[in-house]
Image (cartoon, coloured by chain):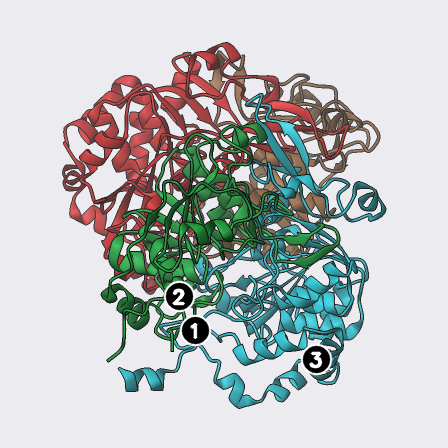
Chain colours: A green, B brown, C red, D cyan
Amino acid sequence: MADYTNYTNREMQAISIAKSISDGQIAIVGTGLPLIGAALAKRIYAPNCTLIVESGLMDCAPIEVPRSVGDIRLMAHCAVQWPNVRYVGFQANEWLHDTSRMVAFIGGAQIDAYGNVNSTCIGDYHNPVTRFTGSGGANGIATFVNTIIMMQHEKRRFMDKIDYVTSAGWIDGPDGRAKVGLPANRGPQMVVTDRGIMKFDEQTKRMYLYGYYETSSPEDIIENTGFEIDVSKAIKIDPPTPDIIKIIREEIDPKQAFIKVPQ
Amino acid sequence: MADYTNYTNREMQAISIAKSISDGQIAIVGTGLPLIGAALAKRIYAPNCTLIVESGLMDCAPIEVPRSVGDIRLMAHCAVQWPNVRYVGFQANEWLHDTSRMVAFIGGAQIDAYGNVNSTCIGDYHNPVTRFTGSGGANGIATFVNTIIMMQHEKRRFMDKIDYVTSAGWIDGPDGRAKVGLPANRGPQMVVTDRGIMKFDEQTKRMYLYGYYETSSPEDIIENTGFEIDVSKAIKIDPPTPDIIKIIREEIDPKQAFIKVPQ
Amino acid sequence: MKKVYQLSDAISKFVHDGDYIAFGGFTTNRKPIAAVSEIIRQGQKDFILDSGPTGSDADMLIGAGRVKAYINCYTANSGVTNVSRRFRHAIEKGEILFEDYSQDAAVLMFHGAALGLPYVPIRMMLGTGLVDHWGISKEDRQKIDKLPNDKFLIQDDPFNPGHQIVLLPVPKIDVAILHVQMASFDGTCRIDGDEFHDVDLAIASKHCIVTCEELVTDEYIRREPSLNTIPGFCVDAVVHLPHGAHPSQCYGCYDYDNPFYVMYDKASKTQEDFDQFLKDWVYDVKDHSGYLNKLGGARLADLKAVPGFGYHTDMTKMAQEG
Amino acid sequence: MKKVYQLSDAISKFVHDGDYIAFGGFTTNRKPIAAVSEIIRQGQKDFILDSGPTGSDADMLIGAGRVKAYINCYTANSGVTNVSRRFRHAIEKGEILFEDYSQDAAVLMFHGAALGLPYVPIRMMLGTGLVDHWGISKEDRQKIDKLPNDKFLIQDDPFNPGHQIVLLPVPKIDVAILHVQMASFDGTCRIDGDEFHDVDLAIASKHCIVTCEELVTDEYIRREPSLNTIPGFCVDAVVHLPHGAHPSQCYGCYDYDNPFYVMYDKASKTQEDFDQFLKDWVYDVKDHSGYLNKLGGARLADLKAVPGFGYHTDMTKMAQEG
């Protein structure tokens, strides 16, 4: 019989993502972990959430795992296939109408203490050491939607000053977004990594450690974070129950497209 | 046997409209005479012209006569059913791309010597004696597309100063459009009335009499025009041949929806 | 999360005095007339009505005295009434505030709102009465919370100095009402034929009521996602309302009721006759079922669209002539 | 007026050195790869390439050295190559001019062009590198005729003073290339599934080339006008080109060719391997027929979409697992 107690940190990430979606919410997902997490949310924690992708596909319920947000696996099983600009407008209108039913998942290569994210380049913008895809939909999402940021938790990624801000977080503090002209009532809510969950202080908008996985610790987080991080409020996050792990492995990602089962 | 020699001035108008469409052109039509004229053009003079309407229906070939530009009689027999804004964008892009394949037909209640047209109100705008529909698509058309204007030829309609400019003509002369910020290489080309055809002088952009129907005369035109009009270059327009009248009555508008056959 | 409503409940819940309101459809095509009638029945008033190309939807609401400010680009039951008569009367008698835009501008304003743009820059309206005259003065606009303070602004094009452009404000629509061929329980909509500006309204409005010919399961409407255009989360209320666009057209379902429009044309000539029309066809019928019963089954059957045409035509006659 | 072309004739007639060019589709979906290969074969160069979310369409053209300036928002064969490698290499080595926008901005710029707007005002990109950095300097922009002089402008919102907005220039696209499921002789197009930004490109571009899976009569495509999205007069050339989007997906027709993308991923790691890829799959195959023959019939058959899904899945296996 399969062992469902040997959970991985990637599975913990997927579960953290799933739990961050409230029932009835509209989740903007990409492929990979957010899609797995959102599928898990829909299966367990938030059965009435709906999934949308930045290519314009609305209320997606893929049967096979898609490789991109434009994949016909999403297109075939959705409610509406909107041209991209309709999605863009919808996203802005959710802010204009002051609703709070959207949540979005974005990733990046670098992040700073205020949740500003870089998915453009390492090094100088004009002469980068490493060039990435660029914004995709992330900049627009980070403008209008509360975000959950997925990161690999490494010192070289959690930096005091990131090389390029692709998607705005809280900029440099509580007035940061208003100062630069961005909606001030939107911003990053949480950072989910392979070591734990970070949130942002309500007063300072600086990242702090909310909780660490069983395999991590406050010391481990401090060591792998390139800026000073408050761990004083940190809790240990309970390990997942085997039935949740079973659902991930058997139902959500049976082909291990995004989450490998430990040997 | 039916008499096809007793043509009416309305039929002459429809034929004038038809002849103003070149083969291969895209004609923006409304209902009524322009639609009849364009159908006749497609049947006789310009078999490869296509008809579009401001509601967004592209390449229309109605079988039954529609009552409005949004009529499902147009929707059922067209190539593409565009939302209205796509039409708006297409119209502007034809100007941006500097093509000359569009021609449009607009009407109005009043017109001045420079082809500015009023389809909004008689009298003061705020306290009108008579209020009309308003612009519809005419203002946008008159901005970006060369127009043919259909009018009833009466002194009270051909005025020195019209009560409201709904659709810009040449404004007040050769520099008129450029001065107000409108595309200078577009404007009214012709006015088709129940008495004859007016064109605009290339130098002054003032209306002059190009030709009068058999039932009219330069004197008749002068008498029914509220501003000074040059009739010195006017020609008498040949009457239509019976076979054209037969086509209008038997094929284009057999139910006399827009053109009554004389008793 | 339940979105399926009775018409009366949907209207009373989402339509309020003073709302900025807009209707889908185009003049005599897919107009939410049954919903307009229910608004008239319920008594909501003081609307800012902004509807793109309208017909008797706007005219009825104006005639019933419910419109405080009307944003117009074209108002006619084309082919029957060339200028809607209650609209015309209200302006000629100075009974309502009104503003004029070109249709191009009007639909771009809806679209700009749906795209989330702060405003829409255009090259149209210049040199005409549409910029020379403000129907609603800046002073009046400042008094009406929901109207932008400016009809438009004129600016030098920052990318092309020396060229003037017109900046249009985007409307903040409180409630939009659409009539569509098909919707599902969760509000997903399918519009057959031209969508006109309906999708823009669904996205841009704070609340959206959809009346539909067919109410289907969420699963059924998802079998052909390519045919759907409005996701459920843009819709607040779905009302199953067959013939809800009568007397206007509904592509693939039914044609306009021309004798009804002719009757409306006559009835709308005077306020007295119009009030009698409202009594007969709105107040006294009590609800949409009453309205349909008054019309009668045969009349409705006779409007049915012919598959292959999408509109009604007398096929028996065609076959005989054939 | 004849619009049906051979691929080589369409490309040679409408694609020229220095053109501002854009492609339809989305990363690995409905990308006009066969047309891109033909451009590479013919030798046109110095493009300004502006394509919304791209994958190997852009990467191939960049790798072949044909792109002078690249307007980027996202470039990846997602799921196989997370950052397109020739794109990445060209930027890391400083080989091309490039500019970054967010995807939202990029598609709004196409859309604004298609709407005929002078520019597009938005509320995004503020506070980020997208406004802090110009990939292509004003000086360089002034040297390139077809690029706007400004990446963007920042202005106070005239309707909401004190609030900054970003004004985006609209591209002047010389030629757009789309791959669609169905087109007719006169250029009328039917796109099955998401249109992405394709209709915008067709309207906004001076010339538009469409490659299609099925070429049908004008009469046939008009039987269901509701399914069509591009009128013929927006299209200059129609090329009948089955599998013209391979290795990308074409909804309802075929799925991506994953092993091909994996091969491309490897081949695009070095210029040398990439050049060999071009030799093998572009130059030496001579044309699209040669390309399809090289792929082989069985491989193409194995990508065929399953009706009911719209994508390829192993139904035999599913039935067995069933």
Picture coordinates of residue C34 (x, y %)? Answer: 25, 37
Residues at discs 3 and 2 both on one chain? no
Real-space CA distance between mark 3 and mark 2, rounded to the nearest whole angstrom? 32 Å
Tell me the CA gap for discs 3 and 1: 27 Å
The foreground one among D269 and C243 is D269
Q: Which residue is mark 2?
A: A76
Quadrant of the image containing the N terminus of chain C: top left
Label 2 neighbourhood size at 10 Å, few (<14), some (14-19), many (20+)? Answer: many
Query: Is residue C128 or residue C136 the one in the foreground?
Result: C136
**Crowding at mark 1 (Cα within 10 Å: few <14, some 14-19, many 20+):** many
On the image, which quarter does residue B175 sit in?
top right
Q: Nearer the viewer, mark 3 or mark 1?
A: 3
In the image, what residue type sits under mark 2? Ala
How far from the left and from the top, in percent, is residue A110?
Answer: 57, 51
Is D90 on the left or on the right of C34, as rendered? right
Please name the residue shown 44% across and 67% down the image.
A66
Res D5 seen here:
no
Q: Is residue D82 left or right of residue A64?
A: right
Which numbered disc covers residue D277?
3
Instruction: Please indicate whether residue D296 sits to the left or right of residue B101 in the image.
Output: left
Q: Chain of mark 3?
A: D
Give me the C-alpha separation between circle 2 and circle 1.
8 Å
Q: Position of residue D92 (x, y in %)?
A: 73, 60
Task: Determine the residue located farthest toward the top in the rendered image.
Answer: C139
**Which is more N-terminal, label 1 or label 3?**
3
Do the residues marked 3 and 1 share a common chain?
yes
Which residue is most to the front? A219
Q: Which residue is mark 1?
A: D311
Q: Residue at x 30, y 31 (%)?
A: C264
